């Protein structure tokens, strides 16, 4: 386990096979345990996505996501994808954690409204034309491979007309016989 970068994740099976009672005590010392239905926030280090990280002895032996470790301690199985039912990345309460797949996790995101397309907040196209009823064309898009939901795409009518005008002019110029 030498030469592991500080932020490198390690194989969970290796991590679990090498843990001991002091590691488990150290883990729970970094958790603010509250009521059984409340979130139990991780109060130690986090990664760049806001999830708690835990190392068995020191960072050279690799880091593990704290909620995955908590799930393992409660169930003695390592989850494929450890999903939060509470939407709190710092929560390590085993009652709030579920095993699942990445597809399950993305469906949870969509169902809870966290899988938001940043384009829906745009009020104008890149050329500055407004997205309003008269100037917006909306068409359906193929269903998402993850959620199965058919999406909608919008485009600026003014920009599309300008593109079509320029395209037609180019095609006519190409078809004109050379003199």
Image: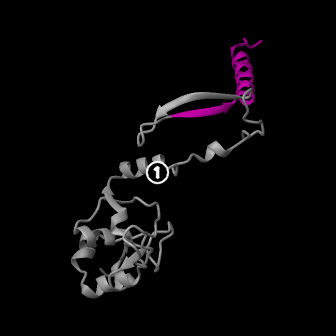
Which residue lies most toward the bottom here?
22
Quadrant in which the N terminus appears: bottom left
Q: Main secondary structure of the magenta part?
A: helix
* Residue 67 screen position, x and y as percent: 37, 69
Query: In this image, 152 relative to 167: left or right?
Result: left
Visible residue check, residue 114: yes
Visible residue check, residue 4: no
Query: In this image, 135 relative to 71: left or right?
Result: right
Q: Height in image: 177 above or below 30? A: above
The range drawn in magenta is 151-179
Query: Who is closer to the viewer here, 2 or 176?
Result: 2
- Indicate whether residue 57 is drawn in magenta: no
* Residue 97 screen position, x and y as percent: 35, 63
Q: Height in image: 149 above or below 88? A: above
Query: In this image, 72 relative to 147: left or right?
Result: left
* Residue 102 screen position, x and y as percent: 37, 52
| Residue bearing the label numbered 1 | 109
Q: Quadrant of residue 152?
A: top right
Query: Who is closer to the viewer here, 35 or 8?
Result: 35
| Residue ID at (42%, 73%) | 40
| Residue ID at (47%, 78%) | 45
Query: Who is closer to the viewer here, 71 or 172?
Result: 71
Tell me the element at label 1: helix
Q: Height in image: 77 above or below 127? A: below
Q: Quadrant of residue 155?
A: top right
């Amino acid at each position: 386990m030498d030469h592991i970068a500080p932020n490198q994740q390690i194989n969970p099976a290796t991590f679990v096979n090498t843990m001991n009672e002091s590691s488990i005590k150290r883990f729970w010392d970094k958790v603010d345990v509250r009521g059984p239905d409340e979130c139990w926030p991780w109060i130690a280090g986090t990664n760049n996505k806001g999830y708690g990280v835990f190392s068995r002895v020191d960072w050279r032996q690799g880091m593990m996501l704290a909620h995955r470790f908590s799930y393992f301690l409660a169930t003695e199985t390592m989850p494929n994808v450890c999903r939060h039912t509470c939407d709190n990345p710092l929560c390590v309460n085993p009652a709030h954690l579920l095993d699942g797949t990445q597809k399950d996790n993305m469906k949870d995101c969509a169902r809870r409204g966290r899988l938001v397309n940043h384009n829906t907040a745009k009020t104008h196209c890149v050329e500055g034309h407004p997205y309003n009823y008269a100037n917006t064309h909306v068409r359906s898009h193929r269903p998402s491979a993850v959620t199965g939901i058919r999406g909608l795409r919008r485009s600026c009518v003014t920009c599309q007309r300008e593109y079509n005008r320029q395209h037609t002019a180019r095609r006519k110029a190409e078809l004109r016989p050379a003199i």
